Amino acid sequence: MSKSSDEREAVPRPSAGAGSWEERGITRRDFMKFCTAMSAALALPVSLVPRIAEALEADGRPSVIWLEFQSCTGDTEALLRAANPTVGEIVLDVLSVDYAETIMAAAGHQAEEARLKTLKERSGKYIAIVEGAIPMKDNGVYCCVGGRSAVDIAREVCGGAMATITVGTCASYGGIPAAAPNPTGAVGVKDAVPGATVINLPGCPVNTDNLVATVVHLLTFGKPPATDGKGRPLFAYGKKIHDNCERRPHFDAGQYVEQWGDQGHRKGYCLYKMGCKGPETFHNCPTQRYNEKTSWPVGSGHGCAGCSEPHFWDTMTPFYRRLPHVPGFGIETTADKIGLGVAAATAAAFGVHGVVSALRKGDESDAGKEG
C-alpha cells in the first residue's frame, strides 16, 4: 500500500551535515527500522519514530568520555560485540567517542589530553559513560589512571557531563569489588559523585541494546529516561525477570528442575529450586536477550544470579540455593506451596472425572488378590 505525500514527508530526510547514512552503506529502510526498534525498546509510541530519526541525523555527534575503573572490562567487551548498530556505527556514526582507554588509538599523555580537551571544549554537553566501581578508601589510591585517582577523575568528568551512564553493576552499585569485606571501599558512581545526573544500567555485563536506547533517549529528548528508585531506566528495569520468563508457565504449574541434567532440566522446567533469582531481579533479559537477541542465561539452562540488583554478590548468594521466600508474591510465597496447590488441583480434577475412584477400586482389588 503506497503512502501519501504527506506521510512520506513526515519521515525526515538526512540533513546536509549528517553525513547521510546511505553514504556509509546503511539504507534508508534499515535506518528507519533501527529507529523503530529504538522506539519499541524505549516503550515509546511509533509516532515518535520520526523524532528519533531526526535526532540521530542532526548535525554534530555528541561527545562521549568512557571511563574504566575497577572492572573486568566485560562491558567494553559487550560494546565490541554490539550488532544493531555495530560498534563501528556507534563509535563512528552515532557518537564521537573522544576517550575510551580500551579502544582508543592514543595512549599515555595523548590519551589524557584528549579527555581534557573534551572537558574544556564540550563542558555540559558531553555524555560520560563509566565502567567499573570507584574505590574511596585511603583517598582512592587503589585505582589510579595517569597518576590520578578514579574518584578524582570521576568527579571531574561526571560533574561536568550533561548526563552520566553507568554500564554494569560495578559502576552502578559497586558490584563485586564492593562485596564484603570491600577492602578498597568500592562504591558506585552516584555515591562517589552525588551531584551528578546518573543513569544506572546494571547487569554483568550491560546489555548494549539498553545502552544504545538510553543514548537515543538523551539525544531525542535532551533528558534521561524515567527511572526507578535505584536509578535504572523503567523501559529496561521496570519488570521482574520472573514476569516475562519463558519458564514462568512451569513455575505456575509446579514443574521444577530438581537436579542439574534431570528430565525437568531437559524439558525446560523452572529453575527456581536450583537458585534462580528471577523472582527478585528487575531486568529485561527475557525480552531483550543477548548476542543479537539469540539467548540469555535462563534460556540457556542456568538460573538468574540477580546481577542487576545492588549488592547482589552478598544478598543473592549462594547462587545455587533457592530463595526461601519471595517478597511481594502473595500466594506464590514458595515453590513448595505452589507444588502442593497444583497437586491438590490435579487431584480434584481427577475426582471430577471419576478417575481417582477407579484407581482406588483397582488398588483394592489388587490388595485382595495379594491377601
Image (cartoon, rainbow, N blue to C red):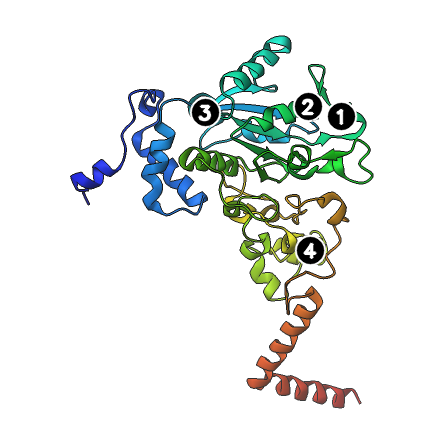
CA gap, disc 2 and disc 3: 23 Å
Query: Which label sits on residue 152?
Result: 2
> Could you classify mark 4 by the number of other residues whose Cα lies within 10 Å: few (under 14), some (14-19), or many (20 or more)?
few
Mark 2 or 4: in front is 2
Residue under label 3: 62
| Marks 4 and 1, the one that precedes in the sequence | 1
Q: CA distance from mark 2 to mark 1?
A: 8 Å
Task: Identify the image quadrant of residue 246.
Answer: bottom right
The disc labelled 2 sits on which kind of residue?
Asp
Q: Which mark is residue 140?
A: 1
- Find residue 262 and name its label: 4
Q: Residue furthest top?
A: 109
Residue 136 rendering spot, x and y as whole percentages: 75, 30
Q: Secondary structure at mark 3?
A: loop
Look at the numbered disc 1 and give the secondary structure of its residue: helix
Q: How many marks?
A: 4
Q: Which badge, 2 or 4, comes first in the chain's sequence?
A: 2
**The quadrant where residue 370 appears:** bottom right
